[in-house]
């Protein structure tokens, strides 16, 4: 009788293809990397939960055009009494924040606990210089201050959105003309521009320190 694969009739000697098993060190490495990624993501979300909660609520239920127009109309009518002096107002994201004017580099971190920060040496409303203002998009939730997420919704702004500054009994109105993401070292060139514009800066993506988001607006 014919042989089966040259081993005769003993079926116990027939061998099928071997099951491939990856080396143990690869399995162990993959498992460890997965755990590191999972716990890193968990820590990241926990630390930045307040900011991402604000973003999620905004995207789930954004303000209507009517609401944004209503917020803007008071400012367009120059109703200064509706807002405290030295205030930044952005109707689209319902932002109202005190501005700490002429803040030195040494004072920035403490001033960010009290609102947004105007960088000392940059312009003021009415001057032909860049008005440079920065604020937290996220911060450690255990840090003191009520403004750790004041710029969390800054990435929601787009060209033609409006911002207002209330200063010295006057409201100055600005319209967004540009949105850029830059490295840390590129920021200086925007802060030193010799034309009147409002530049709002925050860390980006939210919860990281990788880049800077700049929202540039010009007076209307």
Image (spheres, rainbow, N blue to C red):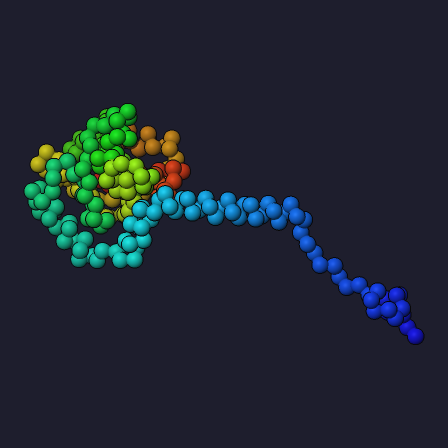
Is any part of residue 116 visible from this angle? no
**Residue drawn 28% across and 54% down?**
57
- Residue 202 in the figure: left or right of residue 11: left
Question: In the picture shown, does residue 119 fall above or below 154?
Answer: above
User: From this viewpoint, which residue is outermost toward the right?
Assistant: 1
Q: Is residue 11 above or below residue 174?
A: below
- Residue 169, given in percent of the width and then of the height, sits at 8, 36
Front position in the image: 152 or 110? 110
Count of numbered circles in the view: 0
- Decide if residue 16 is on the left or right side of residue 151: right
Q: Residue at x 88, y 65 (%)?
A: 7
Q: Nearer the viewer, residue 33 or 166?
A: 33
**In which quarter of the view is residue 65 placed?**
bottom left
Displayed quadrant of residue 190: top left
Q: Quadrant of the rendered structure where residue 6 is?
A: bottom right
Instruction: Point out residue 36 in the picture as x, y percentages from the top left corner.
Output: 50, 44
Whether residue 16 is visible, yes or no, is: yes
Q: Position of residue 197 (x, y in %)?
A: 23, 36
> Measuring 26% from the left and 27% from the top, which residue is drawn there?
107
Relative placement, left or right, of 106 versus 6 is left
Q: Quarter holding the N terminus?
A: bottom right
Picture quarter with the C terminus: top left
Which residue is most to the bottom?
A: 1
Q: What residue lies at 61% left-to-right and 47% top-to-bottom?
A: 28
Q: Position of residue 175 (x, y in %)?
A: 21, 44
């Amino acid at each position: 009788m014919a042989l089966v694969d040259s081993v005769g009739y003993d079926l116990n000697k027939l061998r099928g293809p071997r099951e491939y098993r990856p080396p143990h060190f690869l399995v162990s490495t993959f498992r460890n990397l997965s755990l590191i990624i999972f716990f890193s993501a968990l820590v990241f979300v926990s630390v930045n939960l307040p900011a991402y909660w604000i973003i999620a609520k905004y995207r789930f239920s954004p303000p209507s055009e009517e609401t944004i127009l209503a917020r803007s109309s008071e400012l367009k009518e120059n109703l200064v009494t509706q807002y405290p002096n030295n205030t930044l107002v952005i109707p689209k994201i319902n932002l109202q924040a005190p501005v700490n004017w002429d803040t030195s580099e040494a004072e920035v971190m403490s001033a960010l606990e009290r609102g947004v920060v105007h960088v000392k040496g940059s312009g003021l409303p009415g001057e032909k210089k860049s008005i440079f203002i920065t604020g937290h998009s996220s911060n450690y939730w255990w840090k003191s201050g009520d403004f750790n997420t004041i710029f969390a919704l800054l990435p929601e702004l787009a060209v033609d959105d409006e911002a207002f500054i209330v200063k010295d009994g006057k409201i100055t109105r600005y319209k967004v003309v540009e949105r850029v993401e830059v490295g840390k070292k590129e920021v200086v060139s925007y802060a030193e521009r010799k034309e009147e514009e409002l530049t709002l800066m925050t860390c980006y993506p939210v919860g990281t320190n990788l880049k800077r988001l700049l929202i540039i607006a010009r007076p209307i």
